[in-house]
Amino acid sequence: MNSARRKILRVLSGETLTPPPIWLMRQAGRYLPEYRQTRAKAGSFLDLCYSPEHAVEVTMQPIRRYGFDAAIMFSDILVIPDALNRNVLYTEGHGPEMDPIDEAGIFALKADGVLQHLAPVMETVRRLRGELPDETTLLGFCGAPWTVATYMIAGHGTPDQAPARLFAYRYPKAFEHLLMLLAEISAAYLVAQIDAGADAVQIFDSWAGVLGEQEFEAFAIKPVARIIASVKAQRPHARIIAFAKGAGYQLKTYRQKTGADAIGLDWSVPLAFAKELQREGPVQGNLDPMRVVAGGKPLEDGIDDILQQLGHGPLIFNLGHGITPQADPANVTALVERVRGWKG
Ligand code: CP3
């Protein structure tokens, strides 16, 4: 393995590269016609996640098209509730659904067997390392306990995660138990991904932004810090990116309190504040995915602002959240070319 050539790993260790390396959250997905083709062949969405053959194929598609500096293994954050027997289903137009969990259900959850259920994901990672160019970083991931718990409690996505927020006030013991169980499972899952060949991992806390101050400490920081401490105790060389979407000012202490090597920034983070955060270590982000849909000048201006403000420090260029299905693949080509053409 020649990981010294992997640019994203170099930035994760604190180096500044000009131009910065780039990958995009949700880079494998419905905006690509070749994804839709494989998706149709694979059966259900979970069949795709658990088929190493098809999952490798869709992971490789954006690498072949754009030559991104990282590939992210194709799976979903909700394979953990699926492995916990919550009957996860992805239906066209509805997003993910599962059996909503209650207090008794939480105390009845059993963590054993989860990694066995997820063995196909580790097989995907192993095969990917063999297929990827040597210089491409391979990323694993999991959802943060808070974000995964919001879906488990509501049974589906909601605009503001009111069901999980309410549940946490009403049943604090059960909720704490759920978060700590998810943290323990997630740490073991990330270690397994690293052992299978992932160079670094990202923890997605997509719903961190709906939490109040005390809840952010208890539900976003504490479980993520626990995962990172556990992974780093077991695999000291592991590199970890933590993405707390919508966390705003709370990001000021997020890196230090969680122990993450890099922090992901959504597009609402002002670049002056992002620059301040970058003094403490690498940052990743933070182009508005709608600029990729818009294309043209809005896309170019958004890219240039990020490069000018953050390009002189350790930066992994990315979007501020996942690319959306309506993005034109040609705009992604323009994005990659503009970032790669930056001379500093
Ligand atoms: O390319 C990659 O980034 C890797 C694959 C990946 C997926 N989901 C594939 C996917 C990753 C890293 C995720 C993370 C994920 N999944 C998050 C965290 C990041 C974020 O976007 O907030 C969350 C909250 C989920 C849960 C989830 N999965 C939702 C809410 C949905 C429905 C919304 C949608 O985009 O359809 C999914 C489905 C999903 N996960 C799709 C893909 C490509 C689309 C499903 C399909 O192909 O039919």
Image (tube, rainbow, N blue to C red):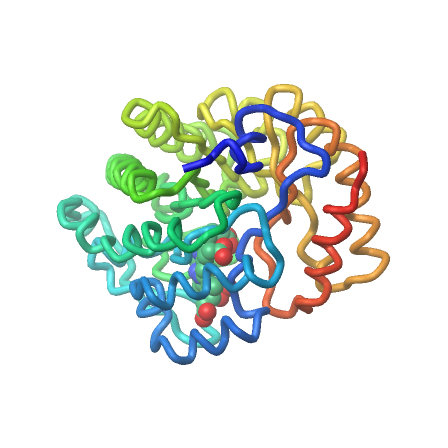
Question: Does residue 269 lie above or below 236 as drawn?
Answer: below
| Position in image of residue 36 (x %, y %) | 50, 75
> Where is the C terminus found, in terms of image quarters?
top right
> Is any part of residue 175 visible from this angle?
no
Give the residue displayed 62% in from the left and 58% down from the top: 66
In screen coordinates, is 274 left or right of 211?
right
Q: In terms of depth relative to the viewer, which is nearer, 65 or 293?
A: 65
> Where is the N terminus found, in terms of image quarters?
top left
Give the residue displayed 65% in from the left and 34% down from the top: 315
Q: In terms of depth relative to the viewer, which is nearer, 191 or 277?
A: 191
In screen coordinates, is 344 left or right of 50?
right
Q: Quadrant of residue 309?
A: top right
Q: In terms of depth relative to the viewer, which is nearer, 337 or 42?
A: 337
In screen coordinates, is 308 left or right of 265?
right
| Position in image of residue 7 (x %, y %) | 57, 36
Question: Does residue 330 lie above or below 182 as drawn?
Answer: below
| Position in image of residue 234 (x %, y %) | 27, 26
Give the residue displayed 47% in from the left and 32% down from the top: 216
Give the residue displayed 48% in from the left and 60% down from the top: 60
In screen coordinates, is 337 left or right of 210?
right
| Position in image of residue 75 (x %, y %) | 38, 57
Q: Quadrant of residue 120?
A: bottom left
> Is any part of residue 68 visible from this angle?
yes
Q: In terms of depth relative to the viewer, which is nearer, 175 or 343?
A: 343
Give the number of callouts: 0
